[in-house]
Image (cartoon, helix red, strand yellow):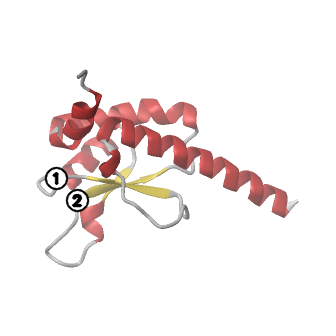
Amino acid sequence: HYSAHIRRMRLLYSRRRVFLTELIQRHCGPHALSDFSDNAGLHLILNLPDEADDVAIALDANARHILVRPLSRYYLTAQRKKGLLMGFASQPETQMEPAFNVLLECLKMHCPQALAEAEKQNAPS
């Protein structure tokens, strides 16, 4: 029973990872997602421009009941990469897109340049 449960959960988390990856790439561009060598883990990192205030974005998102963590808080050095740590394990796909749309509102308000690349790619030629 346990091995069947593990298989089901791996499949479930894989689908959720793919769904969130597609949302990020569609709305923020292909380079907005940190590239990891494997598909392990239950979090993704949404990269933000260096001038972004990932702490302010995370606080705004959290106030709107979207739980993300500022990546810069995980650095000990003065040079900190900006981004958002996003978990997907507990969020069904049916709730991901509405939640991501709320996060997009926060990004538009605090860091519109984070969406600029995707907007250029999606613009009619």
Give SS at disc 2: loop
Q: Mark 2 points at which residue?
A: 82
- Across and down, in percent, residue 4 comes to 83, 57
Judging depth in this view, the residue of 6 and 35 nearest the camera is 35
Report the front residue among 106 and 4.
4
Q: Residue at x 83, y 62 (%)?
A: 2
- Specify few, some or many for label 1: CA neighbours under 10 Å numbering under 14, 14-19, or 20 or more: some
**Are discs 2 and 1 less than 8 Å apart at CB?**
yes
The quarter of the displayed image where residue 104 is located: top left
Where residue 23 sits: x, y (%)? 42, 38
The numbered mark at residue 92 is none
Residues at marks 2 and 1, CA–CA distance in whole angstroms:
7 Å
Quarter of the image with the N terminus in it: bottom right
Residue positioned 66% across, 47% down in the render = 12
Place of residue 124 in the rendered image (x, y in percent of width and height, measured from the top left): 25, 21
What is the residue that sits farthest to the front in this orientation? 125
Q: Residue at x 30, y 70 (%)?
A: 74
Identify the residue at image location x=15%, y=72%: 79
Q: Mark 2 vs mark 1: give the one in front.
A: 2
Q: Mark 1 points at which residue?
A: 53
Q: Where is residue 115 in the image (x, y as percent from the top left)?
A: 23, 38
Q: Which amino acid does label 1 sit on?
A: Asp
| Quadrant containing the C terminus in the rendered view | top left
* Mark 2 neighbour class, 10 Å CA radius: few under 14, some 14 to 19, many 20 or more: many
Q: Does residue 11 lie above or below 122 as drawn?
A: below
Which structural element holds mark 1? loop
Task: Residue type at mark 2: give it.
Answer: Lys
The answer to which of 30 and 49 lies nearer the viewer is 30
For marks 2 and 1 on the same chain, the one whose residue lies earlier in the sequence:
1
The residue lying furthest to the bottom in this view is: 77
Report whether residue 51 is seen.
yes
